[in-house]
Amino acid sequence: MSDSPAASHWTEHKATNGKIYWHNRVTKASSWVKPNEIKTRFDHAVDASEWGLNTVNDKIYWYNKTTKQSRWDMPEDLAQLKATFDAEDKAEAERKEAERIAEEKRIEEENRIAEEQRKKEELKASAQSPMLQIGYNGSQSGTPMLEGTGTPLAIGGPAAAPGLAAEVTPYEAKLALMDLFKQKGVAPDWTWEATIRELITSPVWKLEPSLSLKKDYFSEYIRKVVEDERAEKARRMDKLRPQFRDMLARTGRVHPYTKWSTLRAVIMTDPKLLKERSWQNCRDDNERKMLFDEYLKHIQKKEEDDERELRKNNIDKIMKYIETNKVAMDTKWPEFKRDLKSSREWRDDPDLQRVDMLDVLNIYEDNLVMAEKAWEARKKKMKTERKRDQRRKREAFTGLLKDLVKDGKIKHNTKWNDIIVDIKDDPRLFQIAGNSGSTALELFWDTVDEFQIHAEIVGQRVEDAFSMSNTKLSEEVSLNEFKRMVESNNVEIDWEGWSIEDIHNVITQKYLSQKREEKHQSERKRRIMIDDLRSAMRYLEPSLTVEDKFEDVLPRLKDLPEGKWLKDDDEACKIAFERFVKRLKDRSRDHGDSDHSRRRRDRRESVSQRERERERDERRAERRRSKSPHEEQREAKKPRKEEVEEGEMQG
């Protein structure tokens, strides 16, 4: 960059759109293109190349003037060239800095020699006429004044100022230098080196011998000048801003989308607007554009605020329309939009017609979500109320059962048919009918089970008392015998309100149930042994035939392990033998019969199998009917005999 005074007049600025421009403080001219006075060697090299620079959104990018391509980073050839120039500029700057330091030392040395020479001359002259060397500047008080500054000095005059620098206080030297900067027109765009060259010949410059202090005074003066200029400009712009805004408003040509170039062209072609005082009071187009940009932002913000307020009001109107017309949850969007546009609120309100349909859609969807949530809340509340009502009905029926318990109508062995006559007309029974959860029958059995468990506990207590006296109980003990046994053994038991008849019934039913279970297990075990023996007959040597007699085969069957299990049960062995012979006959008949007869026989066997399964199911149902629900529940929890045996074998 050039160090000429003309180059120092240019300053760099950034417009509101982020683009860089340069302003000349002296000529008040502005330029979007970098002036030649401040261009560097690299800038000239870029101008001569096929690449150019541009700015968009505060970002600088490179574009090729030939290929029209653009890129964010600097091209490689220019980057290398810039690195070369930077290295040369750095070397040149270091060289100039060394020359500057040498020049300052040389000047200081010359000043020192000159001052010593002048001191010798002053001493020689003062010996002849001391008062002739003191300048009073016309002051009646006789106080000497510094030449051209008006700064009072202790001694000396204009001619003696350089030689009497030591007689001036540092503060007086600072004031004199500040006044000298102002007289010489030192501006913020002056460099320190240019200032030295301009002021070094002035006698006032030598009042302060320290060069570093002079540079500090120079920097302080520049800062003060810049602050004063900024403050003065701010005061002037504050005064000019309302006038300029009023002028722009009166033109009627400024809209939120108006560009500065468009407005400037309009004003330049209108003599009346061109003579406006607010337009003329601006120093240049940069100030006018700055005021225009501020006004543009003002009206843009006002328009945004108006749009925001209009949007808010329209949203409130749409929500009020939905609330007033009670839009259903199942209303479709096309139907809702059609009804809205045909409504009186829409036709009579031009502002509402400007609403964005996307906002309407969002409100419609939000309304659906809120309606669904409200529906879910009502549904949940109804479900909760229904459950609460059903629970109240169950509790009411439970209260009915408790009343029957108090009246002695429900005991451990009570059946449902025993109480249905007493409760068939009670409304609490009809209320629980169709109720979810526990049914009336289940609640009844729960009550009976509680009695059954309690009765069994007392019955077990009675059995324990009899076992201590070596008295055995069975299902064949009658009620009278049971009473005599209790009296004769002096059994002391807490009956807990149970009668001796109830306890006798509980114990009798217990032994009967055990006997039935033992019989069932014995029959089951016998069937399994019969099947095992029949299977073992297939492996006898010599093999059995259909002509063999049971009496002849029985000894051979007894020798089999499966036959030994049956011991003296010849009837079971006979059943196994007959089944085996029947199977042999069927197999031999299968080989000689036709397909028709085979199918007929298969049908007969299928019918027989179904009959056997039906008989088996009937027997099981009969056994279940003979047991109480509590016994069935307890037996279901018992491990099966096969599982116990398998566990013992594994153990």
Image (tube, rainbow, N blue to C red):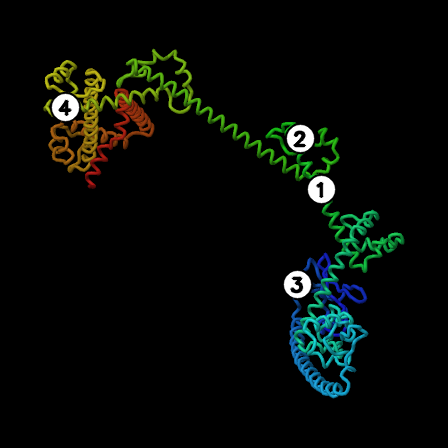
Tags 1 and 3 touching, CB below 8 Å: no
Residue 334: quadrant of the picture: top right
Q: Which mark is residue 465?
A: 4
Residue 187 percent location from the top left of the image: 75, 69
Tags 4 and 1 touching, CB below 8 Å: no
Residue 411: quadrant of the picture: top left
**Callout 3: SS:** loop
| Whole-number angstrom distance, CA of label 1 to CA of label 3 | 37 Å
Tags 3 and 2 touching, CB below 8 Å: no
Of the residues under marks 2 and 1, which one precedes in the sequence? 1
* Residue at 30% in and 13% down: 407
**Callout 2: SS:** helix
Question: Looking at this view, is 515 or 427 the one in front?
Answer: 427
Residue neighbourhood size for the residue with mark 1, other residues' Cα within 10 Å, grouped as few (<14), some (14–19), many (≥20): few
Residue neighbourhood size for the residue with mark 2, other residues' Cα within 10 Å, grouped as few (<14), some (14–19), many (≥20): some
| Whole-number angstrom distance, CA of label 4 to CA of label 3 | 105 Å
Of the residues under marks 1 and 3, which one precedes in the sequence? 3
**Callout 1: SS:** helix
Residue neighbourhood size for the residue with mark 3, other residues' Cα within 10 Å, grouped as few (<14), some (14–19), many (≥20): few
Residue neighbourhood size for the residue with mark 4, other residues' Cα within 10 Å, grouped as few (<14), some (14–19), many (≥20): some
- What's the residue type where badge 4 is placed? Ala
Tell me the residue that label 3 is attached to.
72
- What's the residue type where badge 1 is placed? Glu
Residue 145 shows in the view = no
Tell me the residue that label 2 is attached to.
321
Residue 333 percent location from the top left of the image: 64, 34
Camera-near label (4 vs 1) is 1
Camera-near label (3 vs 2) is 2
Q: Please identify the quadrant where the N terminus is shown.
A: bottom right
Of the residues under marks 3 and 2, which one precedes in the sequence? 3
**Callout 4: SS:** helix
Tell me the residue that label 1 is attached to.
307
